[in-house]
Image (spheres, rainbow, N blue to C red):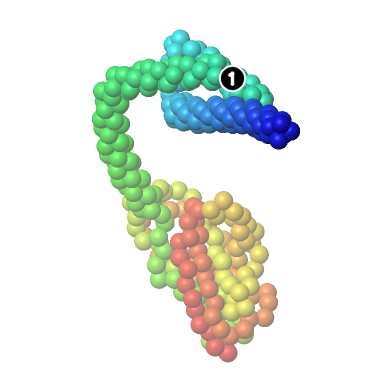
Amino acid sequence: MWVAVGLLVLLLIAIGFGVTQVASLKNEVNETRLLNEQLQLTNDQLSLANEYEAINSEFLKYEDQAVQLANDTILAKYTAAKNKVEQLLKELNTEKSKSKKRISELQDEISTLRGLLRHYIAQIDSLNKENAALRNENAEIKSRNLDLSSKVQEVSKKNEALSERMTLAEKLNVTGVTLTPLKKNGKSEKNITKAYQLMVTFTIPQNNSTPVGTKTIYMRITNPEGTLLGNAGNFPFEGSSIPCTAKKVIEYSGDEMSGVKIYWDVTTTLTPGDYTVELFADNYRLTSRHFQFKK
């Protein structure tokens, strides 16, 4: 009898332990199921968030064309749906437990957003097609304008070249330039170091294109050391004021003037070597010549 009682007690204990284990397993199963549901909802949320980013990125590609639809209600609808999606995503990110209802709302709003995007792109494409003819016409007009502009520039360049040639034709010319050292009696001096005067002689050829009238010829003589000889004041040249050695005023009638002379009285020691003579008039450099002298 005591044996039977002991067996009964052991059986009851075993049954109680089994019931406890079963209850524990049920709890674990429920917790696992709930965890799986939350993970699935979180995954759905991330997937929807990625889809939203893709839709919005696609919308932003057409953002520069939004001005074409500034008065269209689709932009207001898209902005409202976009704000709703962002609000739902923000709320879901702060919730510890995900709600199927909230995820479903997010899914609906994103579907709305996707539909609005398709509508928006369709309208943009329609406008682009309507404007294609105008763009082609504008391109044709621009092409004709470019061709006309090119012809105008070509004519302008020809006119500039002609004007430059005419201006150069008006330039006073000089030929036969010489530099001669002189003695005190006016005769030629071979030894440059003994010169009393320096005389520059030249000819102005006939030129019917050069305006007649009073002309001032400015002369510059530079010694072998590169120093300007003399100081007869300054004259304007190419926007600057430069000094000259001497100057001479002539009356030019358009006919040839030969034997024109400009003198400079030597006031410093002259050395053998290369001397440069430059003549200027009417803001032109008429000539530049080099002359070699020995002792």
Residue at the extreme right of the image, as rendered: 2
Residue 152 in the image, given as x and y percentages of width and height: 30, 37
Q: Is residue 109 above or below residue 46?
A: above
Where, quadrant-wise, is the N terminus in this rendering? top right
Q: Is residue 14 above or below residue 295?
A: above
Report the amino acid beneath label 1: Ser
Which residue is depicted at the point 36% across and 61% down?
205
Which residue is depicted at the point 68% across and 32% down?
4
Q: Can residue 250 be seen here? A: no
Quadrant of residue 11 within the rendered picture: top right
Q: Residues within 10 Å of mark 1 (few under 14, many from 20)?
A: some
Count of marks, rendered view: 1
Is residue 220 or residue 53 the one in the foreground? 53
Residue 218 vs residue 265: left or right?
A: left
Q: Which residue is mark 1?
A: 99
Residue 277 in the image, given as x and y percentages of width and height: 52, 70
Residue 6 in the image, given as x and y percentages of width and height: 72, 34
Residue at the extreme bottom of the image, as rendered: 295
Is residue 291 or residue 129 the one in the foreground? 129
Which residue is depicted at the point 39% across and 67% down?
175
Q: Is residue 176 above or below residue 212?
A: below
Q: Can residue 73 be seen here? A: yes
Quadrant of residue 267 within the rendered picture: bottom right
Q: Is residue 188 above or below residue 248?
A: below
Is residue 18 or residue 149 the one in the foreground? 18
Is residue 237 or residue 212 the one in the foreground? 237
Residue 11 vs residue 287: left or right?
A: right
